[in-house]
Image (tube, helix red, strand yellow):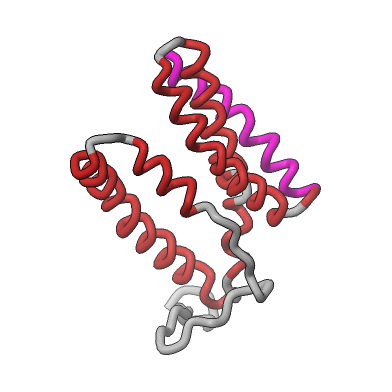
Amino acid sequence: MILLVTMVLLMAAITFVGRLNDRVGRKPLLMGGMAGFFFSLPAFLLLRQGSIAAVAVGMLMLGLSLVCLLGTMSALPSLFPTEARYGGLAIGCNLATSLFGGTTPLVVTGLISATGTDSRPRAGMTACTGPRRSSRRSPAPVRGVDLVVRTYRGPVGPM
């Protein structure tokens, strides 16, 4: 029940985060979302408390950080040149999802069974969100891979 209520609240909050993205830009929201994951250790500790209020607050702490990141997803296509937008976004998102989304539960389970404590995954999540600085505004073009999908722009009509 707590999960359902939290998800409904986050679902309502994502529209406001999207509007805020239009006003202040995506960089402050992305940085805020990443900074929010520094609170993952206290959030996981709250989840272990077991009381309804502590679990709800812990889930909201993690969820609001995630909403800040998800609310800026509409800006992802602008990272790629127009000709390579669909291919670049599809390859990048699907590759990252399959590599990290598929292996994360395995790695976390292995860490918990190897160390005997569940604090290692929490510490790893907090460490992975360390400060990062980008030297460029836009990513360099991908070399050696042709992501451009050519389309025929001939006359339209019956053949």
Q: Is residue 113 left or right of residue 71?
A: left
> For the C terminus, which image quadrant?
bottom left
Magenta: main secondary structure: helix
Residue 13 lies in the magenta stretch? yes
Compared with residue 72, is residue 39 higher up or lower down, i.e. above or below? above
Q: Is residue 26 left or right of residue 45?
A: right
The residue furthest bottom is 144
| Residue drawn at x 34%, y 55% as measured from the top left | 100
Q: Residue at x 70, y 35 (%)?
A: 16
Looking at the image, how many numbered discs can be counted on the residues?
0
The answer to which of 9 and 158 lies nearer the viewer is 9
Instruction: Please tell me whether residue 59 is drawn above or below residue 80 in the rendered image.
Output: above
Q: Nearer the viewer, residue 103 or 23?
A: 103
Quadrant into which the N terminus falls: top left
Q: Residue 98, located in which quarter of the rendered image?
A: bottom left
Q: Position of residue 90 (x, y in %)?
A: 43, 63
Residue 83 locus on image (x, y percent): 55, 77
What residue is at 56 percent from the left and 37 percent from the top?
39
Furthest residue in direction right, as rendered = 23
Q: Write down the region rendered in magenta.
A: 1-23
